[in-house]
Amino acid sequence: MSYIAPEELKKKAGDILEDLKGKELKAKDRIAIPLQEMPSQDPKVRKGNMDEVALGYFEEQVKVEALRCLQCKNAPCIKGCPVAINIPGFILAAAEGDYGKSLSIIKETSLLPAICGRVCPQESQCQLYCTVGKSLKDVEQSVSIGRIERFVADYARKAKAASVPECKPDTGKKVAVIGSGPASITVAADVRKEGHQVTIFEAFHKPGGVMVYGIPEFRLPKAIVEDEIQTLIAMGCELKTNYLIGRTRKISDLMEKDGYDAVFIGTGAGLPKFMNIEGENLIGVFSANEYLTRVNLMKAYEKERSDTPIYQAKKVAVLGGGNVAMDAARSALRMGADEVHLLYRRTEKEMPARVEEVAHAKEEGVQFHFLRNPKRIIGNDTDRVTGLEVLKYELGEPDDSGRRRPVVIKDSEYVMDIDTVIVAIGNNSNPLIEKTTPGLETNKWGNIVADGNGKTSMDGVYAGGDIVLGAATVILAMGEGRRAAASINARLAGQ
Amino acid sequence: MNRIIEKTQLSQEVFRMTFEAPDIARERKPGQFIIIQLDTEYGERIPLTIADADSEKGTVTIIFQAVGKTTHLLASYEPGQHIENVLGPLGQPTHIENFGTAVCVGGGIGVAPLHPIAQALEKAGNRVIIIIGARNKELIIMEEEMRAIADELIICTDDGSYGRKALVTEPLKEQCEKNPDLAVAIGPPVMMKFCAETTRPYGIHTVVSLNTIMVDGTGMCGGCRVTVGGETRFVCVDGPEFDGHLVDFDNMIRRLGSYKSQEDDAHHKCHLDLKIEAEKQK
């Protein structure tokens, strides 16, 4: 994918619209309409700034892209959406230029369209099932559902048309929501709407969870997350930052002493995994969590103003192939690294990162090394990283996940000249709540056990998002939050 | 929230500060720590130890040394001002029981976190021998508080300006001869390392409390990781206390220097700022 300037994309879309004006479109005409690329900042410019890379569709583009939708009767895309958004419905409204209606259709089931439109892995969800993509035998040619979603959400944001949802009269019931990421935000909104009091407890000094500490500004502007939080506060939710449930207060105290009628645990998957290889505690080795938190939440990218130091990395190796790995690699470039290498032990096809993030990373100059895995990290006599010993792999038989298992090639070691290593191979769940809440059942990975309605083994205690699923996505967390909120509301209504 | 009640300058760079934090005052146990941040947008998060707390008044007392930008700024705060963000209590509490005889060693401002631990050990029925040390007389802190707890209090200074002219390891070795049941050492990493080396030949279980680089303090970043008995552990959630005989102090000390060049610049700048401030006041 080569870079096309935004103005050119806008002009092309305008021409197409002009062409299609007044024409009756059959399915084959719609399929023939070219996919609208996402306008983005010039790669040469953006790797020197933290501003959002994807700029969002122009109105001309959203109209063209919406016309590509076949409005399939069976709507296969909906089945691919974890929260079953009425996708053909909102796209039709967008095609008609009624963005307000389009947004309200999305909001029937999704609470965070401006966020999900940006960070959902659409190509493995809704867009995977799109008939247009299937006809063209290329999932990347599917209707850009996420980009249209983002446009209608941003349109309302820009027009300041997003209203504060109405809440029912006070019921006198109290709900504690632990964490302030996507699952918790969803629960807080849905429970508050029913008239219950909501207190959100966040351990960090700022709310938003992974959307604030993890996902970088250039992919998800913090102002969007902040808007969602402000909406909750306008609805009457109380927010307590610097409050670590399990340490500052225990769940049992919330329920027995502080009068909360229900508790929702949405604390996410916070404990970084390391590789357990030699040299991992050398200076210059970071978890992606630490690196990204320093850059994002602590704003190390504003070097003159932020008090939080960031390691002066010149030659960086990022280990992993997910979105977090892409975020870390692209952040390292923006923090001034000369070279950023990304090592993944399978091939590009198996990489779990969003296609768009991989493409952006490549455009910005991240160097990808597939079928590679580190063997050990090499340091000097002051324990600073000087190199990475790497093993080559090849793909073998499929494993339990259905992906072909990477197999090490014997004696294939070589050393890369590296001064910084960022480990982005996933997270485990944080054991703090489990350890401080006797009676709360967890599985062997430390995830809280919850049923389809978010109910845990403890009466009145619900959980959802990554703390239940293991590391997953914003939209799955939101879906879990919706179900848990419904179940909390049902419980409180019955009391 | 977090309103400062009292501030005392204990020495040129060491301050004692008491502030309102009722939740932390109620929940904190010996061995635990807090994280503070002075500015929500641009401030850094730094771990500080708890020297004392009063659950009835809802106050927490910290003793800190002005070494970096944040601690210098905090030192300039006056009663009535608020600390913007305080998180805690963090970390695992000290395991307290009646061991028999416990030797507690505190170096520099390490005496501050040692205080609640020694207090709890004493309360649990232990015979508590306390050794406190510092470079000179001026830097000895909490002498009276420690004297009130200790069955025996030994003070040493590097320059002999107060108490014995000795490093803390010297009286510690003498105590080891008497077969104590537990040693606790808190202070600069090098001091803890040598305390652990002192007790090792005697086979006395030695608890050390580590203060490493941290961001969140809740297990999320892993910046605080140390090698203990060949395994990686997180100081913020697995610690801060570990078996001193198993900690890889050399690696820990080097890791503390991860951002040294940037910190030196900040320290230098802080001192310049303080100097300018002092000049202005003249």
Image (cartoon, coloured by chain):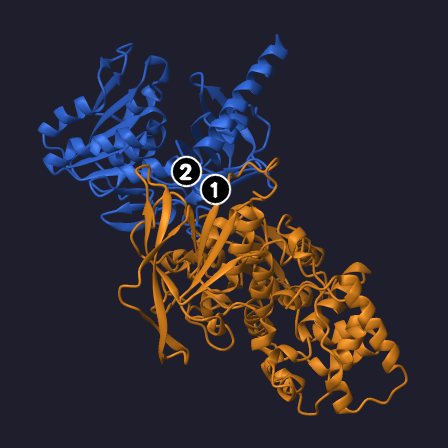
Chain colours: A orange, B blue
Percent x, y of residue A493? 60, 73
Percent x, y of residue A129? 60, 84
Q: Quadrant of the C terminus of chain B?
A: top right
Outermost residue toward the right in this view: A22
Q: For numbered disc 1, what is the local secondary structure?
A: loop
Q: Image quarter for residue A25?
A: bottom right
Pointer 1 chain: A
Residue named by callout 1: A311
Q: Are marks 1 and 2 in contact (CB under 8 Å)?
A: yes
Compared with A17, A244 (above or below) is: above
Q: Image quarter for residue B214?
A: top left
- Crowd tier of the residue under label 1, counting other residues whose Cα lies within 10 Å: few below 14, some 14–19, many 20 or above: some
Q: Is residue A374 left or right of residue B269?
A: left
Residue named by callout 2: B258
| Residue B276 in sight | yes
Pointer 2 chain: B
Q: Quadrant of the N terminus of chain B?
A: top right
Q: Amino acid at mark 1?
A: Tyr
